[in-house]
Image (tube, rainbow, N blue to C red):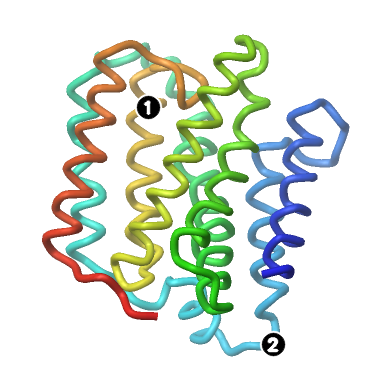
Amino acid sequence: MIQVLVVLAAFAAVMLSGRLGVRIAVPFHLQGVEVALAVVGGLWAGHRGGAVLAALGLRRFERRGVLLALLGTLPMALAWSLPDPAALATADVLVGALLAPVGEELLFRGYAVGRLLDGGVPRARAFVLPGALFGLLHMPGAWDQGPSAALMTGLVTAAGGVWYGWLFVRWRRCLWVPLAAHVAMNCWWILGSVGPVASSGGLLPNLGRGLAIALITVLTVRWTTKEIR
C-alpha cells in the first residue's frame, strides 16, 4: 500500500506542477500520460510482457463489457448538438478523449486498484483512495471558475474514479471496460462542447451522463458476479 501511495503522490506532484504553472518540458496533459506509462512500465520492467498485461488488466478482453461501456454511453449523445467542425481540429479530442483516459486508467485503476487489492486492502478502500486522488487532481482545472466549481469538479471526478474502479473489478479486472467507458464519456463530453471540466453543463448533458452511468451499472450487475480476490 505504501508503494502505491508513493507512486500516486509522485504522479500528483507532476500533474499539479503543470496545472499550477510550473515550467516542465512537456504540456501538463501529456505529463500525466508520460508519468503513468513510465511508472507502470518501470515497476514491471522485470516481468515478461504477458505478466505486465495481466497485472494491469489488459490481457483479458471482456468483449461484452467493452461493448456495453461504449454503447451504454449513447444517452450522452442525445443531450448535445453538433459543435462547430473547426472546434474538432484541435488536440482536445485526442488528448482529452484518448491520451488522458489511457494514462489515468493505467495508473489509477490498472495499477493502483489492482495493487491495493493484491496487498489485502479492503475493496471499498481500494476504490476510494485512488478515486479521491483522481478527483483532487482535476480540481485545479476548475479553479478559474471559482471554489464551488472546483469542489464540485473534484467530487464528480472522484465519484467517477470510484465507479471506474468498480467496473474494473466487477468485470474480472479487465481494464478495457472502464477504459472504454472513460474514453467514450470524455469523447461525448468534448464533442458536445459541454464544458472544460466534469462539473460543467446544464441539465440535459448531466442527465445524459447520469443515464449512461445507470445503464452501464445495471447491466454490469446483471451480467457479472462479484469477483473473489
**Residue hosting label 2:** 46
Q: Quadrant of residue 137?
A: top right
Q: Quadrant of the N terminus?
A: bottom right
Q: Quadrant of the C terminus?
A: bottom left
Residue 175 is left or right of residue 170, and the answer is right
* Residue at the image point whose x is 63% and y is 14% from the top: 147
The answer to whether residue 218 of the structure is visible from this angle is yes
Q: Give the residue at the far right of this rendering.
A: 23
Mark 2 touching mark 1, by CB under 8 A?
A: no
Q: Which mark is residue 189?
A: 1
Which amino acid lies under the numbered mark 2 shown in the image of this protein? Gly
Give how far across and how far down residue 98 sits, in percent. 47, 44
* Residue at the image point whose x is 58% and y is 59% from the top: 107
Give the camera-side residue of 159 and 19: 159
Spatial separation of the CA atoms under disc 2 and disc 1? 38 Å
Which amino acid lies under the numbered mark 1 shown in the image of this protein? Trp
How many numbered dots are placed on residues in this image? 2
Q: Earlier in the sequence, mark 2 or mark 1?
A: 2
* Residue at the image point whose x is 57% and y is 44% from the top: 132
Q: Quadrant of residue 47?
A: bottom right
Give how far across and how far down residue 210 sits, in percent. 26, 31
The answer to whether residue 91 of the structure is visible from this angle is no
Residue 28 is left or right of residue 132, and the answer is right
Compared with 213, 154 (above or below) is: above
Compared with 219, 126 (above or below) is: below
Compared with 62, 71 (above or below) is: above
Give the camera-side residue of 128 and 112: 128
